[in-house]
Image: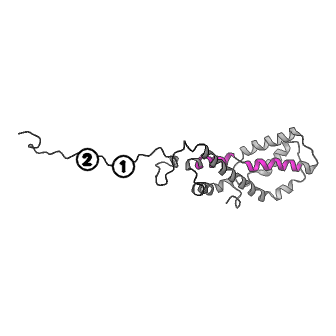
């Protein structure tokens, strides 16, 4: 699904379903970690933009020092933390922003990257979705002893509590019914 659509948000329902049904991850983890990772964890673009900027600088004949490379990497990280999780989320603009931060204002070979953007965006989406799934599995492994059990047959009363099981009360036997008291005078002991 992630390879067919370049949008992390569009793949979220399929990612959650696969994580819960195929990989048997706890619903508490998948429904917290995967949406959070979809918004914040944009490692595909964070790797792609600095590498593209350095490659473009080499094509332009500009040598980048350690300070420029560090500026490119930090700018890309900050841009992709704030990036929306939508298709075409501004990656060409981010590339130009990172290049401008490094001092490259008018790149001549930017069209090479713009022509392949549709394909590269799909690869970045696959990288983001797979990394989010690994993080969800890692979080479940770390918190396995503290997580509530997942019961499929329990209906939760609130959608906020979906996936959270606050130790449900299970009634094993019914309490005895009080016996009907006799209303006759003789039964009460009054003569």
1 w.r.t. 157: above or below: below
Compare residues 157 and 134 and report the one nearer the observer.
Answer: 134
Locate residue 147: give its quadrant. top right
- The chief SS type of the magenta part is helix
Instruction: Classify 10 Å Cα crowding around label 1: few (below 14), some (14-19), many (20 and above).
Output: few
For the record, the magenta segment spans 30-56
Looking at the image, is mark 2 or mark 1 earlier in the sequence?
1
Nearer the camera: disc 2 or disc 1: 1
Residue 140 picture location, percent across and down: 60, 46
In the image, taking residue 165 as reference, residue 136 lies left or right, namely right
Residue, disc 1: 172
The answer, for residue 93, to whether it is visible in the render is: no
Number of marks present in the image shown: 2
Residue, disc 2: 177
What's the residue at 80%, 42% (across, down)? 73
Check disc 2 and report its element: helix, strand or loop: loop
What's the residue at 27%, 46% (across, down)? 176
The answer, for residue 55, to whether it is visible in the render is: yes
Label 2 and label 1: CA atoms lie apart by 16 Å
Residue 70 picture location, percent across and down: 83, 40
Check disc 1 and report its element: helix, strand or loop: loop
Instruction: Classify 10 Å Cα crowding around label 2: few (below 14), some (14-19), many (20 and above).
Output: few
In the image, taking residue 112 as reference, residue 45 lies left or right, namely left
Compare residues 93 and 63 and report the one nearer the observer.
Answer: 63
141 w.r.t. 87: above or below: above
Screen quadrant of the C terminus: top left
Compare residues 14 and 95 and report the one nearer the observer.
Answer: 14
């Amino acid at each position: 699904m992630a390879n067919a659509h370049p949008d992390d948000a569009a793949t979220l329902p399929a990612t959650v379903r696969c994580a819960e049904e195929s990989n048997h991850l706890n619903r508490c983890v998948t429904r917290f970690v995967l949406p959070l990772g979809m918004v914040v964890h944009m490692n595909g673009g964070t790797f792609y933009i600095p590498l593209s900027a350095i490659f473009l600088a080499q094509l332009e004949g500009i040598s980048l020092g350690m300070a420029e490379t560090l500026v490119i990497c930090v700018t890309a990280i900050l841009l992709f933390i704030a990036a929306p999780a939508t298709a075409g989320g501004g990656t060409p603009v981010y590339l130009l922003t990172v290049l401008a931060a490094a001092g490259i204002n008018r790149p001549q070979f930017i069209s090479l990257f713009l022509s392949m953007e549709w394909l590269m965006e799909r690869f970045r989406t696959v990288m983001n979705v797979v990394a989010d799934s690994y993080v969800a599995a890692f979080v479940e492994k770390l918190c396995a002893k503290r997580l509530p059990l997942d019961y499929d047959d329990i209906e939760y009363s609130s959608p906020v509590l979906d996936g959270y099981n606050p130790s449900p009360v299970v009634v094993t036997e019914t309490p005895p019914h009080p016996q009907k008291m006799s209303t006759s005078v003789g039964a009460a002991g009054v003569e």
